[in-house]
Image (spheres, rainbow, N blue to C red):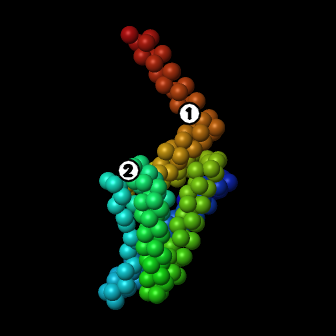
């Protein structure tokens, strides 16, 4: 979205373009990793993250295993055994991913995801200087509604409302509503 002639560009435009580029890169990295993971599975590598059920909870990390074991009332000795077993599973999993050549894909996805989060934070913290900037923020939320919930939606909405207030657009809107109420009251 370009600025109109004589209008200064809104800084949100840069944040929006950065977010779209980061989104595209993260999706591409995720697809590449998925394809590489499927090839590794076909070669009998065990590349899926290990899980462990402790009590009634499925755990994906040593910390989760420790918490679930403690909450399920296991003895301290059994808690340590379960944590050690999960630690071994995770080490084996990392070794399998490395042997399958997936580490590079994992790093790339981690980096692109970190850039996406950074771009998303920039979108929520950058102040819009024009109504067009606010519209871009709201377009992001519209995308989230269409594609599924995003944890940043609420932050973007709060930021857009703050921008509208700062730009004086909310006050103008409230003023128009009050004026309409007065006109309607006089007509009654």
Establish if 75 lies above or below 47.
above
Residue 148 image-quadrant placement: bottom left
Residue lying farthest bottom?
Answer: 43
Residue 83 point in image, percent of width and height: 46, 64
Crowding at dot 1, Cα within 10 Å, few <14 / some 14-19 / many 20+, comes out as some
Residue 111 point in image, percent of width and height: 57, 71
Residue 93 point in image, percent of width and height: 44, 77
Picture residue at 49% right of the left edge, 45% below the top: 154
Crowding at dot 2, Cα within 10 Å, few <14 / some 14-19 / many 20+, comes out as some
Picture residue at 57% right of the left edge, 31% below the top: 172
Residue 22 image-quadrant placement: bottom right
Q: Which residue is mark 2?
A: 72
Image quadrant containing the C terminus:
top left
Give the alpha-carbon distance from disc 1 to disc 2, as whole Å: 52 Å
Along the line of sight, the residue nearer the viewer: 65 or 146: 65
Picture residue at 34% right of the left edge, 54% below the top: 55
Mark 1 vs 2: CB contact within 8 A: no
Secondary structure beneath label 1: helix
Along the line of sight, the residue nearer the viewer: 110 or 25: 110
Q: Which residue is mark 1?
A: 170
Along the line of sight, the residue nearer the viewer: 148 or 57: 57
């Amino acid at each position: 979205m370009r600025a109109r002639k004589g209008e200064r560009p809104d800084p949100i435009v840069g944040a929006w373009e950065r977010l779209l580029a980061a989104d595209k890169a993260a999706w591409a990295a995720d697809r590449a990793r998925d394809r590489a993971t499927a090839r590794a599975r076909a070669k009998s590598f065990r590349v899926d993250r290990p899980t462990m059920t402790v009590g009634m909870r499925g755990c994906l990390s040593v910390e989760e295993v420790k918490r679930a074991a403690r909450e399920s009332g296991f003895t301290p000795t059994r808690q340590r055994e379960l944590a050690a077993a999960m630690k071994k599973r995770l080490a084996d999993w990392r070794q399998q991913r490395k042997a399958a050549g997936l580490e590079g894909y994992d790093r790339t996805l981690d980096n692109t995801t970190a850039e996406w989060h950074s771009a998303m934070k920039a979108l929520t913290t950058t102040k819009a200087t024009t109504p067009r900037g606010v519209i871009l923020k709201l377009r992001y939320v519209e995308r989230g509604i269409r594609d599924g919930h995003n944890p940043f939606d609420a932050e973007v909405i709060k930021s857009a409302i703050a921008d509208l207030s700062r730009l004086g657009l909310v006050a103008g809107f409230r003023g128009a509503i009050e004026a309409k109420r007065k006109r309607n009251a006089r007509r009654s």
